[in-house]
Image (cartoon, rainbow, N blue to C red):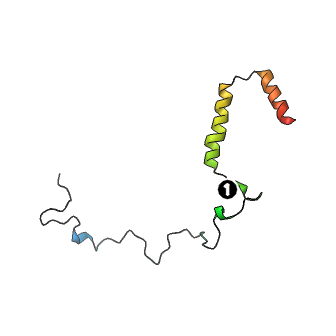
Amino acid sequence: MPSNQPAAGHLAIQPQYLSSQPSPMAKTSEPNRSKSYDPKKPHITDTPITKANWHKHVNWLNVTLIAIIDCGHILHILPLYPYESSWLLLEAEL
């Protein structure tokens, strides 16, 4: 199986294919962003955390992987009997 590497008079890129195919690169006149991108809008890390936007600052992947999975493992490791779980619910309501 021949390789397409340059060797003794053979080019790695064949010139007959260079001009017939359009460039896959974006033109300088075309932006590489979506239509909803606004360069004047500040990034979420530059804004303060408030009650209205706290959920945007939370890394939800970490919350899922650390908090929920670890709590599930802790509850799986510790055996809870029915009377213990009722006390747990009563303490949480108080």
Residue furthest to the left = 8
Residue under label 1: 57
Residue at 85 percent of width and 30 percent of height = 90
Please name whichever residue, 81 or 24, is drawn nearer the observer in this view of the structure: 81
Q: Quadrant of residue 41?
A: bottom right
Q: Position of residue 62 (x, y in %)?
A: 62, 46
Q: Position of residue 61 (x, y in %)?
A: 61, 47
Please name whichever residue, 88 or 46, is drawn nearer the observer in this view of the structure: 46
Residue at 67 percent of width and 35 percent of height = 71
Residue furthest to the right = 94
Q: Tell whether 34 sits left or right of 86.
A: left
Q: Tell whether 7 sits left or right of 81.
A: left
Q: Is residue 23 above or below residue 53?
A: below
Q: Quadrant of residue 56?
A: bottom right
Q: Position of residue 1 (x, y in %)?
A: 17, 51
In terms of secondary structure, where does tag 1 sit? helix
Residue at 66 percent of width and 27 percent of height = 76
Q: Amino acid at mark 1?
A: His
Q: Position of residue 26 (x, y in %)?
A: 43, 71
Residue at 40 percent of width and 70 percent of height = 25
Q: Is residue 19 above or below residue 57?
A: below
